[in-house]
Image (cartoon, grey):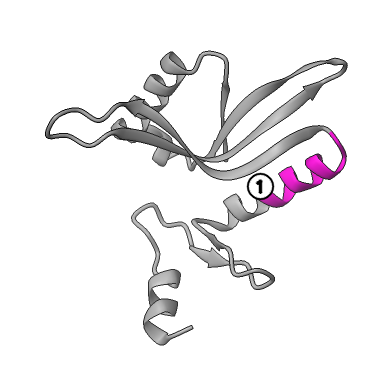
Amino acid sequence: MTVDEYRKLTKRNKYGNNRTVDDADGTRWDSDGEKARWAELQLLEKAGRITNLERQISYLLIPKQPGEQAAYAKWDFAYVEKNGDKNGKQVAEDYKSAITRQNKDYILKRKLFKQLYPDIEFRETT
């Protein structure tokens, strides 16, 4: 890793969280909390309580229009939560600080997502 790459990675963002890299596999994380939540979800998957665990999943909110790009919401995690013998519940989860959850753009994306994807439960974790 070059000095410039290290500086960019360790630079604090506007919300004050520290970006980090997982030394084991080089995965980049937006915060230590997001990295810790991923580890928790991996344990739940190994225990069989969730399946199909994925990171950084994009959901289409507004299709491409003439002269405009499509708009997406990218959530940190997606998985299926098992419910006994029944089909599992799809979950999209985003790790956000209290400050970020007050951001107007974030709120709008969250509302659009809930409207367009009513079968997917949206969760915020901190």
| Residue at x-position 65% and y-position 73% | 23
Task: Answer with the quarter of the image where residue 32 lies.
Answer: bottom right
Closer to the camera in the image, 22 or 86: 86
In the displayed structure, does residue 60 sit left or right of residue 68? Answer: right
| Residue at x-position 66% and y-position 34% | 79
In the rendered view, tell whether residue 75 sits above or below residue 65. Answer: below
In the rendered view, tell whether residue 31 sits above or below residue 41. Answer: below
Q: Residue furthest bottom?
A: 3
Closer to the camera in the image, 103 or 118: 118
Q: How would you classify the magenta stretch by its main secondary structure?
A: helix
Give the labeled residue for mark 1. Answer: 37
Task: Answer with the quarter of the image where residue 115 lies.
Answer: top left
In the displayed structure, does residue 91 sit left or right of residue 114? Answer: right
- Magenta includes 103? no
Residue 102, position in %: x, y? 37, 33
| Residue at x-position 37% and y-position 59% | 13
- Magenta includes 43? yes
Closer to the camera in the image, 69 or 25: 69
Q: Which residues are magenta?
A: 37-48
- Three-letter residue code for mark 1: Arg
In the rendered view, tell whether residue 13 sits above or below residue 89. Answer: below
